[in-house]
Amino acid sequence: MDSVCGKTTACLIVGSFVLMGGWGADSRARAQSSDAQDPPSASSAEEIFRQALASESAAEAERAYELLLERFPEHSLADDALFALAMQHYSLGYQRTSEREFSRLLEQYPEGNRAEDAGYWDGVVLLALGQLDAAMDRFSWVIDRGPSSEKSTWARIGIADCFRLKGDFPQAARAYEEMLERFPSADLESTALHQLARVYERLEDPARARSLYIRLSESYPDTYQGVQATARLADWPQPLRIPPEADSLETEAGEESGGGASGNAQAEEHVRAVESQEIWILQTGAFAVEENAERLERVLSARGYPEVRIETNDSGSEPFHRVLVGRFSTRDEGETMAAVLRQRDNLETHIFRRIEPVPKD
């Protein structure tokens, strides 16, 4: 089954990067510039790069970038081509391939235009792969290279996230607090406030956590973090909610279906008896109050995420309203979108598998 969301994922990846100081407009400008800084034959490299940017398919763009790297490895656009290739592979879910390409760029073009960008995104990929020590080293390299650059501020968030994922909550709290004190900006503040509040809950300091949620909901009510803070305050003082169990035809990623759930296995076999397809879905939140789910749905839809919708599970004592994103044909595609949500909107997700009948024409 072709992915409904593949192209959207790539656009969101690139869009997210451009918002953080991306490569698109600058690379186009340099590709369209005169040949004054390069040998006469460089115009061929510029034409190849322009063709890659105008490509309608990922495969066509990939061939163009690889051709440029093969024929013009010393051209000023070579690191742009390698960076674009790595970002494209990342957007398509090929995380290990993209990590190798980001590393290759740093080795071949350490002083190039895209070295800092490649260092940051290499850290992002390493974090997504669970290589937290390597991710922290890469983020630290970005900070050392340009302590006052925009990328270095996001790299500091990356380091704090690594501490949090390692379970070192005291150090994570210090890192997020330093971000809030030294680098005040709307995007960074909403991200750091939300993560810091969650860390204080893990540190069993509800008073600090609640004050941060209040600050976040009042200062950034229309952001994802503000919506989540408002929903969290509505549930207070209940502990952080664990995502509800999967529906009868759903299996959490990483677990085998069946086992003790004979009803689930029978239901899945029934669906497989007819023509069926496997899809992967992201859950971005589960709310007891439907209005909170609707607010998050509006925020994510406005941000351009694919197939945002609400599903209500009323099989238990209390209904849960789940905000879902996407329908992906592979787990890798779903995890790629999860990485976009995490890096772009500081949104942790829950990925699950669903077997459903193939729609009839």
Image (spheres, rainbow, N blue to C red):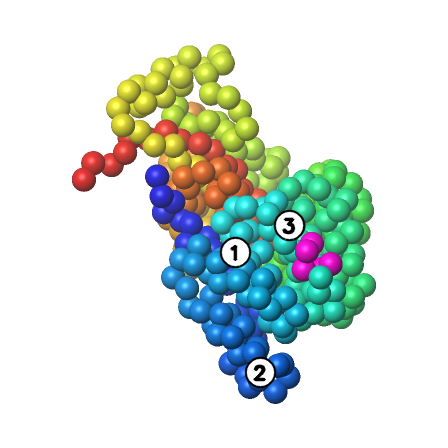
Residue under the point 60% across and 37% down: 240
Dot 3 crowding, Cα within 10 Å, few <14, some 14–19, many 20+: many
**Which label is found at residue 99?**
3
Question: Most extreme residue toward the left, as rendered?
Answer: 361
Tell whether 213 sits left or right of 274: right
Q: Quadrant of residue 270?
A: top left
Instruction: Give the Cα separation between the discs numbered 3 and 1.
Output: 12 Å
Instruction: Give the Cα separation between the discs numbered 1 and 2.
Output: 29 Å
**Is tag 3's residue or tag 1's residue first in the polypeptide sequence?**
1
Q: Secondary structure at mark 3?
A: helix
Q: Secondary structure at mark 2?
A: loop
Please state which amino acid type lies under the numbered disc 3.
Glu
Q: Secondary structure at mark 1?
A: helix
Residue 360 point in image, percent of width and height: 20, 36
Q: Which residue is mark 1?
A: 88
Residue under the point 75% across and 46% down: 134
115 lies above or below 58 = below
Residue 150 point in image, percent of width and height: 68, 68
Instruction: Give the Cα separation between the discs numbered 3 and 2.
Output: 33 Å
Taken as a whole, is the magenta stretch helix, strand or loop? helix
Residue under the point 40% across and 18% down: 264
**Is tag 3's residue or tag 2's residue first in the polypeptide sequence?**
2
**Residue 105 covered by magenta stretch:** yes
Please state which amino acid type lies under the numbered disc 1.
Gln
Q: Quadrant of residue 190?
A: bottom right
285 lies above or below 82 = above
Dot 2 crowding, Cα within 10 Å, few <14, some 14–19, many 20+: few
* Closer to us: 154 or 242: 154
- Please state the extent of the stretch shown in magenta in the rendering: 103-107
Residue 295 point in image, percent of width and height: 44, 52
Q: Which residue is mark 2?
A: 40
